[in-house]
Image (cartoon, rainbow, N blue to C red):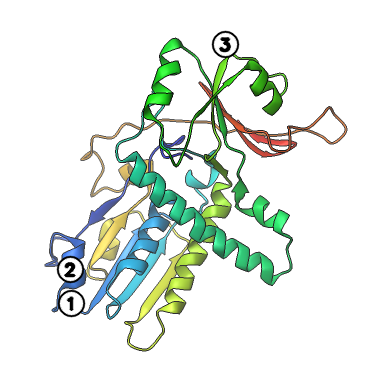
Amino acid sequence: MSLSYSVSPTISIRYAFPSRKITASPVHSLCSQTQPSLRCAVLGAGFAGLSVVWHLLKNSPKRLDLKIDLYDEVGIGGGASGIAGGLLHPYSPKVKLLWEGAQCWNESINLLKIAEEVANSRKCKVGESSENIETFFGHKRGILRPAMDIKNLTKLNDTCLPSCRIETLNTEEVQNLVPGLRLPLGTAFFMPEAFNIHSQHYLQALFGACENLVKESSTFGSGHRQLSFHKRSVSRLLEFEGEYDAVIICIGAKVNMLPEISGRLPLRTCRGVILHMELPDNIGEGYPDRGPSILSDAWIAVQGPRSLHV
């Protein structure tokens, strides 16, 4: 996963049934005096779906009665989002800052901190060590990107964010980080603030943060909040007609499986394969303890001294 999305970006669509009179903007409907309650279905429990749920719970008016049903046939973080490589940074494959990259990076860091707090609190309750907490959440190793052509030598430095710095390293400096790594142009770029997260664990923690928001809303003067997860598939949006005020679709490439939407969006899907590699304890040396993940034409997401995603 990255802000440039190593996997296909998840599509988020709000669907309103024609038979129901709903204002075009969900913000207006939330604030409307004639609608004291809101019932939403969110399809997909990946990066987009859980982010939508969290923001609905966090930003809805306190006195609003809000019911959210989350649907995913393979569970929380069980689809493409859950097996994403986990490399998080704000740059495109062409080494340019993404559109709204600064804001998206800051928002991503905020959600990571929220998920980390949930992970820490849950681990502490069962007596886990701080070392295991970091393993549960992710690996703050940074990301190393070898320069593959001359253009990269200037582009990376021209577009970097102060909050996600890019350091230029020579061959000797790279060898100190990853012994034996060969550089085509003798130069690499290191993003020390970039993340390699365990995608599924992050998503599970973010769902826990959503559950916490529901519990916190039970205070006096707040509207009723309800969040329910349903582990099942949805074959047609008409299944929900008359039940919800809005259906928010966050199921990525599977959106074309819904007959109400299939063929109506100019989508281009892509396919990827992720390989999990583990080195046996009795063979060779492991990856350096603080060695960065590597991003190039292919990528290596380091999960541990003897565990990699490629």
Q: Quadrant of the C terminus?
A: top right
User: Residue at label 1?
Assistant: 35
Q: Nearer the viewer, residue 56 or 105?
A: 105
| Label 2 residue SS | helix
Q: Which mark is residue 175?
A: none
Q: Position of residue 98 (x, y in %)?
A: 34, 34
Q: Is residue 17 visible?
A: yes
Residue 46 visible in rendering: no
Query: Viewed as shown, does residue 69 lie left or right of 289?
Result: left
- What crowding class fits label 1: few (fewer than 14 Cα within 10 Å), some (14-19), or many (20 or more)? few
The residue where tag 3 is placed is: 184
Mark sitting earlier along the chain (2/1): 2
For marks 2 and 1, give the CA distance.
7 Å
Question: How many marks on residues?
Answer: 3
Give amino acid for label 2: Ser
Query: From the viewer's perspective, is the residue at label 3 or at label 1 nearer?
Result: 3
Give above or below for 273 relative to 118. above
* Residue located beneath label 2 in the image: 29
Q: Residue at x 28, y 35 (%)?
A: 267
Residue 284 on image: x %, y %: 84, 27
Are the residues at dot 2 and dot 1 in contact (C-beta closer than 8 Å)? yes
Q: In which quadrant of the rendered view does residue 242 lie? A: bottom left
Front one among 117 and 230: 117
Q: Secondary structure at mark 1?
A: loop
Residue 192 in percent (x, y) is at: 56, 37
Q: Secondary structure at mark 3?
A: loop
* Residue 264 sits in quarter: top left
Give amino acid for label 1: Gln
